[in-house]
Image (tube, rainbow, N blue to C red):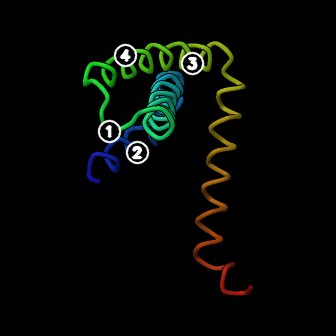
Amino acid sequence: MISCIIIGFVLNFFGRKLFRPVIFLSGLFLTLVAIMIVFYLLFFDSNRKSYVGWIVLAVGFVAGIVIGFLLVKFIKVGAFIFAAWGGFTLGLILWNTFIYLSG
C-alpha cells in the first residue's frame, strides 16, 4: 500500500515525463495478468506439469511487451484504453458506494 502511494506521488509531479513508461508498464502488466487468468481458469487443471505455467508466464510476458510497445507507439489509443478503464472503475466505485441503495 505504501509503495502505491509513493509511486502515485512521483507520477503526480513527474507524470508528463513518465507518461510513456507508465503506459508501457501498464500494458505489459495488464496483458500478462489477463493471459494468466484466462489460461488458469479455462485451460489448466490440477494435474498439469509445472513447466507449463512457466511457459505461459514467458509467453504472457512477451505478449505484454508487444502490447505495451503498441500502446506507446499509438499513444492516443493507449490513453483512450486506460481512460476508459479508469472511467469504468470509477463507475463501479460510485455504484457500490451510493447508487445501489436507490434500487
Mark identifier at residue 25: none
Looking at the rendered structure, the kind of residue marked 4 is Ala
Q: Residue 47: give x, y in percent of width and height.
A: 30, 33
The answer to the question of whether label 3 and label 2 lie on touching residues, with beta carbons closer than 8 A, is no
- Mark 1 and mark 3: span between their CA atoms? 30 Å
Label for residue 67? 3
| Secondary structure beneath label 3 | helix
Of tags 1 and 3, which is closer to the observer?
1
Give me the C-alpha separation between circle 2 and circle 1.
Answer: 38 Å
Q: Residues within 10 Å of mark 3 (few under 14, many from 20)?
A: many
Q: Nearer the viewer, mark 2 or mark 4?
A: 4
Where does residue 99 sit, x and y in percent of width and height? 69, 78
- How crowded pointer 1 is (Cα within 10 Å; few <14, some 14-19, many 20+) is rated as few
Amino acid type at circle 3 is: Ile
**Which residue is at 67% across, 80% downward?**
100
Relative horizontal placement of residue 15, taking residue 72 as reference (left or right): left
The label number, if any, that marks residue 58 in the structure image: 4
Mark-to-mark CA distance, 4 and 3: 14 Å
Closest to the camera, between mark 4 and mark 3, is 4
Discs 3/2, front: 3
Q: Is residue 6 above or below residue 40?
A: below
Residue at image point 29% right, 54% down: 1
Per the rendering, the mark at residue 8 is: 2
Task: Please give the residue where the numbered disc 1 appears in the rendered image.
Answer: 46
